[in-house]
Amino acid sequence: MAGNNMRELVQSMQTRILGRTGLKVKILGVGGISPQDVVEKALEYGLNFYDVHGYKDAQGVDGRVRFKNAFGKTSLKREDVVLTGRSAALTCEELLKDLDNALDLMKMDYFDIYGLYNITQAAGRVEKAMGPGGALEGLKKAKAAGKIRFIGGVSGHHHKELIRLIKTDEFDAVMVAVNVFDQDVVSEVLPVTRALNMGTLAMKPFAKGIFISNPKAALNYVFSCDISAAIPGMMNLLELECNIRAAAGFCGLSKADMAALKKEADEISKTEGTHICRQCGYCVPVCEQNIDIKNIFYMERQANRYYSKPWAQEAYEKVENNATKCIECGNCEKECPYDLPIREMLKKTHTDLVKP
């Protein structure tokens, strides 16, 4: 019965056109970090948009393999779903290799949308990708070969550089963080994508787990913006069904929703200030000391917002490579999409979490 109800809710859910691609998608899609059981149910319930990326789950299973396994359990045809993928490659050769590898893993012939992953993260990436022999050249070759239908899914967090990239008009779709905290995107990026009729995919609608008190309000805010679909990562079936209910019931952003979000944002700002870790984890692989920066900041958030400080102190005490191991190389800050002063934040976190 629950499954039938979910299918009915998805069927009633608003459908939007994904910009100039002309593709029709439900306003709720499925983010690339979602585990296989969530993808299986989402397919069963009728959601039709999937971000398929190489994110590995706790067992080390690639996201593209998870989608292949889930899709193989359905009777759906390839044309029943809209798939987007991305590559971090900067050259034509590397991108085509990444794309072929992704299609092979998925046992698929094409992506509907394929683009560049986190392209604005570091200086020089945009110039290399867009120049002669760059990744854009690879995307155009892939489209001509029928391996992708549209060039897009370009993603980045530094909004000014992303706007410059969007204005080249080379891309059919863009993937950006849209939530109450990322107001620079809402006020500066979305008007540009609307003017160019680009498909706009809203990632991080909960700001990577920051807005959890009222997920319905958080989604309603995102749906009310100029986006084609929201693509949250959903880690369990409860989150999937909660989000489906919110999306199916969307009829605009109410004053009550906005008030709830503003209250939560104010509370977060009081406890965490303006330097808020979004838990993306880009900093972790580049740390020369193997400090689990993401997890340490998670502990502090739990101490400040959800659990007791003694709980967080006990958890931090078990971290072998804690904040004191930092040699201040700065690699983490170069990779942080939100330009956080990670080195200073680590010092503060250590002070807050070390037992007296």
Image (cartoon, rainbow, N blue to C red):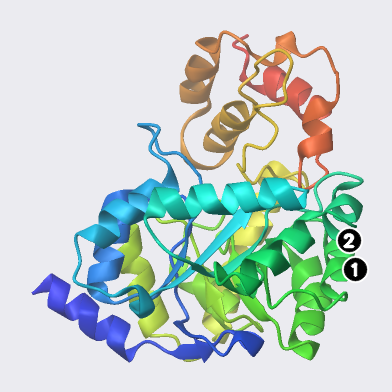
Q: Are marks 2 and 1 in contact (CB under 8 Å)?
A: yes
Q: Is residue 345 left or right of residue 277?
A: right
Q: Position of residue 287 (x, y in %)?
A: 72, 21
Q: Residue at x 56, y 8 (%)?
A: 320
Please tell me how crowded label 1 is: few (under 14), some (14-19), or many (20+) other residues with Cα within 10 Å.
some
**Quadrant into which the C terminus falls:** top right
Q: Residue at x 82, y 79 (%)?
A: 169
Q: Which element carries disc 1, helix, strand or loop? A: helix
Q: Residue at x 76, y 47 (%)?
A: 337
Q: Which residue is disc 1 drawn over?
A: 164
**Quadrant into which the N terminus falls:** bottom left
Q: Front-most of 21 and 155?
A: 21
**86 over 283 or under it: above or below:** below
Kindly tell me whether residue 238 is visible in this rendering. no
Residue type at mark 1 is Arg
Q: CA distance from mark 2 to mark 1?
A: 5 Å
**113 over 126 or under it: above or below:** below
Q: Which residue is disc 2 drawn over?
A: 161
Please tell me how crowded label 2 is: few (under 14), some (14-19), or many (20+) other residues with Cα within 10 Å.
some
Kindly tell me whether residue 218 is visible in this rendering. yes
